[in-house]
Amino acid sequence: MADSNFVNATEKGDIPTFDGSEKAKATDFANYFCSYAQLYHQKQMLADHNRMAAYHSAIMGNADVFKDKVVMDVGTGSGILAVWAAQAGAKRVYAVEYTNMAAHAKSLMEANGVADIVTVIQGAVEDIELPFEEHNLQPESDSKHQVVDIIISEWMGYFLLRESMLDSLIRARDKFLKPKTGLMFPSHTTMYVSPIHDEDERKISNHEYGGAMTEWSEFVDSTKSVYGVDMSILAKDYEREQKEYYLLSSRWAELPPDAVLATPAMVKQLDMCTCTLADSKGIFSGDPNTEFDFDVVSDENPGATISGFAGWFTADFKSRTDEEGSAAPLLSNPAFLSTGPENGYTHWGQQVFHLLSSIPLIQGETTRLQGSLEMTRSKENARLYNCRIRYSSTRRKAGESKDGKVLMKGGVVEHVYQIP
């Protein structure tokens, strides 16, 4: 794929909507945007009631903040967030949508009586301009573009960063949002990871991998005996492909709360008013919070084994916390969205990274997992990520201090998972 003419990234590794060639943009549309042009995909997100309730509460619960304000909805889709912004009292809403879903959004505005407030703009947010003079928009600073009081967006992907829509949001913020008084909805996001018990699914993946390799062996024998061609030279590459697919790809899951074996660790936190394009590119060695240290107490998790790790995120809708935003309006009714196991179903679910072999929990003992997590963009597709997890395990008697006598010490294990 690296040599393909259809790599879904710019030469700098960015998403193609900004500074990408026409070929790269076409590839990006085919790989990413086209699904968002379908109503069935929009319905999947709109039927996620935890998602919907958080945004509805954030907007309608803070109508005093929206009253008479200029709002931009980045990636409006069918347009429901823009409708709520208008209903909350915004004087002008710009609903930006790249795909032909924009036509449906326009119909929705008309059907809900807010077409005089909401202007649907079809195009990449990196390329569009707002009708400053036509709508008599007043900038806060010397930049004529910074006329927006509030940016709302549902930009988050699996494990927060997948899809890399955050790049577009940051560019929109820097170009259009009033820097001192503007608000971002959501305002802050946080990524978490925790060891989990998910043994049935882990074993299924291992079984499917074993089945794929058995089928390959039979295929090689058959091809040689029937057609006289020896395919065994390709065995290592085939094994690598199957291992990456079955064992080293994260899985979407809706985990029960008791699958979480230790207190989740924060691995990344973003202030949406101050985060940068560099922040959006992933989690890198040396970044704050990349290292974790879990204690898994067997007596608190009877019958469990450590099957892997799971990652998810939360989103806050609250007042600005950065120094520059001290003059921004305060939110009297903060809202919160969690995609963790404790919150039930969301369409994001959790991303599960299964271990190749599970770690048993011994009664009366505590298993300690120390390691780190890194997350970087795929070179072939800037909207997808790879996750490197490195860890080692030790065991000690329950009640023994964290750095007390060790009964067992395992070696360092490292795997790179695709987040497809």
Image (cartoon, rainbow, N blue to C red):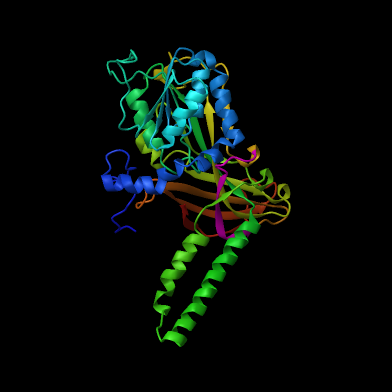
- Residue 207 lies in quadrant: bottom right
Q: Nearer the viewer, residue 118 or 327?
A: 118
Measured as percent of width and height from the top left, residue 356 is found at 55, 61
Measured as percent of width and height from the top left, residue 379 is found at 35, 51
Q: Nearer the viewer, residue 88 or 105?
A: 105
Q: Please provide the residue range marked out in magenta.
A: 344-359
Give yes or no for residue 420 being in the magenta stretch. no
Name the residue located 44 percent from the left edge and 47 percent from the top edge. 374
Residue 176 drawn above or below residue 22:
above
Name the residue located 56 percent from the left edge and 22 percent from the top edge. 334
Please indicate, yes or no, whether residue 13 appears anywhere in the rendered image.
no
Residue 85 drawn above or below residue 411:
above
Question: Is residue 140 rendered to the left or right of residue 213?
Answer: left
Give yes or no for residue 358 being in the magenta stretch. yes
Measured as percent of width and height from the top left, residue 313 is found at 53, 38
Please indicate, yes or no, whether residue 350 appears anywhere in the rendered image.
yes
Q: Report the label total.
A: 0
Residue 188 drawn above or below residue 264:
above
Query: The N terminus appears in which quarter of the rendering?
Result: bottom left
- Residue 60 lies in quadrant: top right
Measured as percent of width and height from the top left, residue 386 is found at 43, 51
Name the residue located 37 percent from the left edge and 22 percent from the top edge. 177
Question: Is residue 221 rendered to the left or right of residue 260?
Answer: left
Name the residue located 35 percent from the left edge and 36 percent from the top edge. 277
* Prevailing SS of the magenta stretch: strand
Residue 389 drawn above or below residue 47:
below
